[in-house]
Image: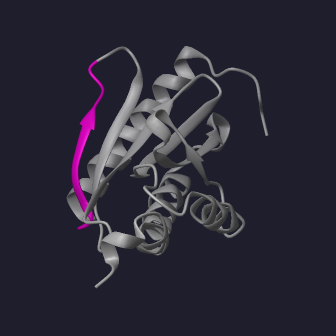
Amino acid sequence: MDSRPATTEELNRLEMLIESWLESEQADNPVIDAVDRDESDLRRWYVRVKGEEKDVWTLWLTLGQRTLRHETYVMPAPEENHERFYLHLLKRNHKLNGMAFGVGDEDAVFLRGTLPVAAVTEAELDRILGSTWAYVERCFRPAMRVGFASRFEG
């Protein structure tokens, strides 16, 4: 895959592709609740998504010179069963394609991935959205039951 930095023209073309894809998804995809654009100079979008296991979550798309970064906040740091919780997530990472669980600010759990800018297409954007939705749906409740077990008792 091409690893050189994208030119301004290439980034502008990809920005238009992402904008067009998001507009189409917002119109046609019932799980898309809202789409917002970062107000700064960054090429970043926030896609609010409706789920089932986790009611609502946001997919952040950030277009850089070399990669499209995609990520979502999954849950706060666990309150209990820390070792079991992180082992659970590490084992889940082996079943994920193009993304991985990681720890971010305040030890919160995120799902993150990157895609080379040369590989950004509508089909890849569809895969990112669909995969993220599936991973959040599959992993959220089991992880909550481990990291916040006492809240599920009784």
Segment colored magenta: 30-39
Task: Please give the name of the residue rendered at 29% of the width and 74% of the height, measured from the top-left corner.
Answer: 52
Q: Is residue 73 magenta?
A: no
Q: Is residue 61 above or below residue 9?
A: below
Q: x, y (%) of residue 90?
A: 68, 61
**What residue do we see at 28% from left, 31% from top?**
37
Magenta-span inclusion, residue 36: yes
49 w.r.t. 113: above or below: below
95 lies above or below 113: below
Q: Quadrant of the C terminus?
A: bottom left
Q: What residue occupies the far bottom of the structure in this picture?
A: 154
Q: Position of residue 145 (x, y in %)?
A: 43, 73
Measured as percent of width and height from the top left, residue 108 is found at 45, 44
Prevailing secondary structure class for the magenta stretch in the rendered image:
strand
In the rendered view, how is the structure colored?
Answer: one colour
Observer able to see residue 9: yes
Judged left or right of residue 55, residue 120 is right
Q: Is residue 53 visible?
A: no
Q: How many marks?
A: 0
Q: Position of residue 134 (x, y in %)?
A: 47, 70
Q: Quadrant of residue 49?
A: bottom left
Relative to residue 79, is residue 64 depicted above or below?
above
**Front residue (pair 65, 111):** 111
At a point 47% along the width and 63% down the height, the residue shown is 147
Front in this rendered view, residue 58 or 9: 58
- Point 40% across, 65% down: residue: 148
Between 61 and 6, the one lying in front of the other is 61
Quadrant the N terminus occupies = top right
